[in-house]
């Protein structure tokens, strides 16, 4: 092979995009491009800042104009109602590759999994549907056409584009989406404080020092995307997922028993251990990995990522610690669930109307009826999450003080509450028996044969 052939080979290797996968650049004389002067004429006045953002974008530089995304049906102040508001399919027409990857990942299930929660339907519409509350974050999941039609009929206008979650409109910037802050608004707070955990971990601190220019461009510091969007892949998915349950169940007998108890409290298995309708939801919304191969595939991807900077042995050991914290957290949570389940079984607590079984239902969230069930909900969704999420995200304080330590406290308090409930029940039972005693006495006297 001579030098020019080698050079050609190298050049081909580094050609950035193959023609099939490249974004579609529209021809400059398309009807959309011709209409653009008009669009800009008005919108420079109505929303100058918005137009400015578009002007700074790769779209503007490549001839992608307002009407490519918003259609040509609205061109005057009177026909605003005819405007098209984009959905992910709008972007798909030019970005097939990212669309396909995105649809295979967990984000694509955001809307479906939110709707599967019993609690969603008891919330004010503004919180569930709008850019607030559950819907404010779960809008990252595209809606099927029927659902979109139903929402639009109810008056819902915006928030259906999903792809603008990380590269916001109208800059649609790749650079913005590459920063960890792009994930911050959603991955924070009560049950998934990944931002807080990451940004205060050594990983996050080093990355922020890079952003501030203290550490150089080449300094190694992973961001969310390094570990969760390897090589820019939009298929975002992890081995354990949010709930940290999986099939097949763990081999360790104690852990297996604990995960079964948790699956019962998630309503995926009924109190007898048989699968319920919720298992179908779990499957449909990709809530848990259902085979060993599926889990191992995600785990391997992660391990390969850590190994770019750490030794494989170091990384394997760190990930195992995450798994082990799930096992240990499950010990505490399963015990607490069994205590509350025992209260239903012994008739100390009545089955709440919104529960399918006389068994704790963790998915009713804050609609859990009484303090003991509320406490169990917090133990699961806040503290168990922090315990293992903090471990995986290399954040000692979240794993220990905000996670594990709180779980130990939850269990102690649940035990105490259960005991108090049992005592109260026994007292009430005795009082009722005492109340009935004179009546029984009278009945006995009335029915005793007179001698
Ligand atoms: C004659 C002026 C005019 C022209 C031309 C015009 N628009 Fe508008 N557009 C408006 C006004 C007024 C509104 C309503 C603004 C508001 O509610 O603040 C609007 C709203 C919109 C909205 C938001 C819809 C909503 O429900 O809030 C989009 C998107 C839009 N225009 C896109 C376009 C596109 C694309 C073009 C070119 C094909 C265009 N406009 C041409 C005046 C115009
Ligand atoms: C690459 C696609 C794309 C292009 C190009 C585009 N938009 Fe948009 N636009 C969107 C998306 C996505 C939304 C959000 C829709 C939603 O929330 O449902 C939006 C929303 C809007 C809104 C209403 C929401 C708001 O924030 O006020 C207006 C007005 C608007 N666009 C005007 C324009 C104008 C004017 C242009 C051209 C300068 C333009 N758009 C170019 C994708 C685009
Ligand atoms: C008419 C075709 C077309 C449509 C529709 C379209 N894009 Fe693009 N997009 C392009 C072209 C062309 C480029 C520039 C070339 C490239 O980066 O491949 C681009 C670039 C981008 C980039 C990279 C920006 C950067 O800073 O490098 C992002 C992100 C993007 N588009 C997101 C979107 C999203 C989100 C939507 C839907 C709301 C959308 N696009 C709709 C054609 C389109
Ligand atoms: C608009 C809100 C929003 C933004 C922005 C967002 N996410 Fe998410 N993310 C979600 C929601 C909602 C889910 C849960 C999806 C579901 O319900 O199935 C999720 C799930 C995930 C998962 C879950 C994996 C699993 O296996 O269950 C990962 C990892 C993730 N996101 C990473 C990221 C990263 C990295 C970024 C930034 C580049 C990001 N997300 C930006 C809302 C968001
Ligand atoms: C601040 C943004 C935000 C809000 C508000 C929010 N979520 Fe989420 N939700 C997320 C993120 C991010 C994830 C993924 C977290 C993870 O995997 O650690 C998630 C995960 C979930 C999951 C698990 C999905 C799965 O398959 O693993 C369900 C179900 C869910 N949310 C329902 C809801 C409901 C119902 C509400 C309202 C009561 C709500 N969420 C409010 C951001 C949010
Ligand atoms: C969870 C955050 C997130 C969401 C949601 C998201 N993107 Fe991206 N997008 C990114 C990141 C991060 C990059 C930069 C990837 C890289 O470093 O190569 C990117 C890059 C892109 C690019 C530029 C690709 C290139 O290499 O030039 C396009 C086009 C794009 N995204 C389109 C989309 C479309 C279409 C959707 C919806 C189907 C979408 N994105 C949803 C985070 C996201
Ligand atoms: C150094 C790599 C790394 C970085 C950086 C990182 N994560 Fe993670 N993340 C992980 C690992 C490891 C897991 C657990 C994977 C598994 O289940 O095997 C995880 C899990 C998750 C999950 C699923 C639930 C959980 O927390 O266990 C979400 C959601 C998530 N990360 C979001 C984020 C977000 C958002 C950021 C940035 C703010 C981020 N991660 C930064 C490595 C990382
Ligand atoms: C882009 C490079 C990079 C990647 C990828 C990365 N790390 Fe790190 N990690 C670092 C650097 C740099 C430090 C700081 C080292 C120090 O404190 O001296 C660090 C620190 C840590 C620490 C804190 C303890 C210590 O030794 O300082 C843990 C735990 C850790 N990483 C685990 C992981 C795991 C697990 C993964 C994969 C999920 C991962 N890292 C991926 C660069 C990386």
Image (spheres, grey):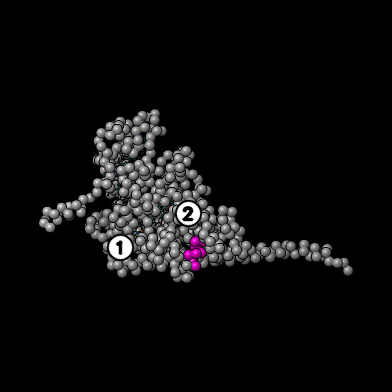
Given residues 291 and 385, the one toward you in this image is 291
Label 2 lies in ligand 5 vicinity (Cβ under 8 Å): no
Viewed as shown, does residue 27 lie left or right of 385?
Answer: left
Residue at the outermost bottom position: 253
Image position, residue 252 (x, y; %): 45, 70
Given residues 301 and 205, the one toward you in this image is 301
Majority secondary structure of magenta residues: helix
The residue at 88%/69% (across/down) is 451
Image position, residue 405 (x, y; %): 44, 66
Which numbered mark, 2 or 1, is in the foreground of this view?
Answer: 2
The residue at 39%/48% (across/down) is 140
The reply to whether the magenta stretch includes residue 261 is yes
Residue 169 in view here = no
Residue of label 1: 304
Image position, residue 142 (x, y; %): 40, 46
Residue of label 2: 281
- Magenta region, residue range: 257-264
Residue at the outermost front position: 1
Based on the displayed image, in which of its 4 quarters is residue 450 positioned?
Answer: bottom right
The residue at 38%/46% (across/down) is 162
């Amino acid at each position: 092979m001579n030098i020019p052939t080698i050079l050609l080979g190298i050049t081909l290797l580094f050609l950035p995009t193959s023609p099939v996968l490249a974004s579609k650049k529209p021809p400059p004389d398309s009807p959309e491009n011709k209409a653009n002067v008009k669009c800009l004429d008005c919108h420079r006045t109505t929303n100058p800042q918005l137009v400015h953002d578009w002007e700074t974008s790769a779209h503007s530089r490549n001839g992608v104009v307002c009407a490519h995304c918003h259609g040509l049906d609205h061109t005057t102040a009177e026909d605003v109602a005819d405007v098209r508001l984009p959905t992910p399919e709008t972007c798909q027409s030019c970005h097939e590759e990212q669309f396909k990857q995105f649809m295979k990942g967990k984000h694509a299930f955001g809307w479906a999994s939110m709707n599967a929660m019993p609690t969603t339907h008891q919330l004010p519409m503004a919180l569930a549907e709008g850019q607030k509350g559950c819907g404010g974050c779960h809008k990252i999941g595209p809606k099927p056409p029927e659902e979109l039609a139903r929402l639009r009929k109810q008056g819902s206008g915006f928030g259906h584009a999903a792809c603008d979650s990380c590269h916001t409109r109208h800059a649609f910037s790749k650079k913005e989406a590459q920063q960890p802050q792009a994930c911050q608004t959603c991955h924070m707070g009560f049950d998934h404080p990944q931002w807080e955990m990451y940004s205060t971990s050594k990983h996050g601190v080093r990355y922020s020092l890079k952003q501030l220019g203290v550490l150089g461009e080449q300094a190694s510091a992973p961001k969310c995307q390094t570990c969760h969007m390897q090589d820019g892949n939009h298929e975002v998915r992890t081995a354990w997922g949010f709930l940290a349950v999986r099939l097949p169940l763990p081999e360790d007998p104690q852990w297996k028993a604990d995960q079964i108890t948790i699956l019962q409290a998630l309503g995926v298995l009924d109190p007898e251990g048989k699968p319920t309708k919720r298992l179908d939801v779990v499957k449909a919304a990709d809530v848990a990995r259902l085979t060993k191969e599926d889990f191992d595939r995600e785990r391997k991807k992660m391990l390969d990522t850590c190994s770019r900077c750490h030794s494989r042995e170091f990384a394997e050991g760190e990930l195992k610690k995450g798994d082990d914290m799930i096992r240990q957290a499950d010990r505490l949570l399963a015990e607490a669930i069994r205590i509350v389940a025992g209260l239903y079984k012994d008739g100390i607590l009545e089955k709440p109307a919104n529960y399918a079984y006389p068994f704790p239902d963790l998915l009713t969230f804050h609609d859990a009826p009484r303090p003991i069930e509320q406490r169990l909900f917090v133990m699961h969704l806040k503290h168990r999450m922090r315990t293992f999420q903090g471990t995986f995200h290399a954040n000692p304080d979240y794993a220990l003080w905000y996670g594990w330590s709180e779980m130990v406290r939850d269990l102690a308090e649940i035990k105490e509450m259960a005991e108090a409930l049992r005592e109260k029940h026994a007292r009430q039972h005795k009082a009722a028996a005492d109340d009935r005693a004179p009546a029984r006495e009278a009945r006995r006297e009335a029915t005793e044969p007179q001698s």
